[in-house]
Image (spheres, rainbow, N blue to C red):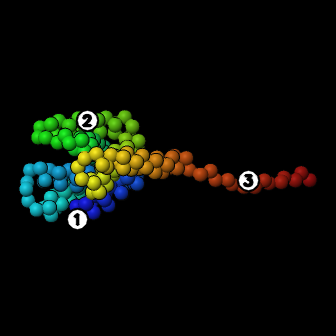
Amino acid sequence: MLSVINLLFGTVLLVAGRKLFWLFIGIIGFITGMQLAARFWNGPEWTAIIIGLIVGVLFAVLAVFIEALAIGVAGFLAGGFILTTFTNMLGINEGLLFWIIYAIGGIIGILLVMLLFDWALITLSSLAGASLIVQSLFSQGGAGGLIFLLLVIAGIVIQGLTLQREDHPPVRRYRRVRRVVRHD
């Protein structure tokens, strides 16, 4: 069930993460809640999903009401998630090192969001979406590396084209109606 959720959320982030940034922040909250539940509690999978849903809804609500703070937090969480997912593919995922890598990824995520807001959201949501999709389709290891890279590129291109269309709407041509002034 978790693989289906990851695949669905990953696809949404890949295609529309910037446009639906509150959903992006909610999904990142969901993932973070599930990761924390899985790390600190060895209960059933549905418990981790419920904890993830609670954290995700909380983050989505925060995104609507406290936009700037939520975006910074989402940048941190997305950066941490993305870097730990990448290092996990390389087999690096041990205790304190996991948290150091998470913090480094988080700081990179915040810096990206601060410097390049739209493109940071596009990049982070594409990376997070690709990470979720690869996680749901491939087990640990380098097998999903090429798919991950192709998905990231596809997400950036799709969302970048959407951003470009928003910045440069199609030119509308209006007929000019000329008044013919007669001088009698």
**Quadrant of the rendered image containing residue 15:** bottom left
Q: Dot 1 corresponds to which residue?
A: 1
Q: Which residue is mark 2?
A: 107
Give percent across and percent down for residue 106: 24, 39
The amino acid sitting under disc 1 is Met
- C-alpha separation, residue under disc 3 versus residue under disc 1: 59 Å
**Vertical position of residue 73 compared to residue 7: above or below:** above
The 10 Å Cα crowd at callout 3, few under 14, some 14 to 19, many 20 or more, is few
Q: Amino acid at mark 3?
A: Arg
The relative height of residue 70 versus residue 46 in the rendered view (above or below) is: above
Between disc 3 and disc 2, the foreground one is 2
- Mark 3 lies on residue: 176
Q: Residue at x 37, y 34 (%)?
A: 115
Quarter residue 85 falls in: top left
When asked about the image quadrant of residue 87, the answer is: top left
Q: Given the image, on which type of amino acid does mark 2 rest?
A: Ile
Q: How many marks?
A: 3
Q: Quadrant of the image for the N terminus? A: bottom left
Q: Which badge, 3 or 1, is on the more N-terminal residue?
A: 1
| CB within 8 Å, label 1 to label 2 | no
Q: Secondary structure at mark 2?
A: helix
Which is more toward the observer, 178 or 41? 41
Q: In terms of depth relative to the viewer, which is nearer, 142 or 23? A: 142
Examine the rendering and report whether any part of residue 22 can be seen. Answer: no
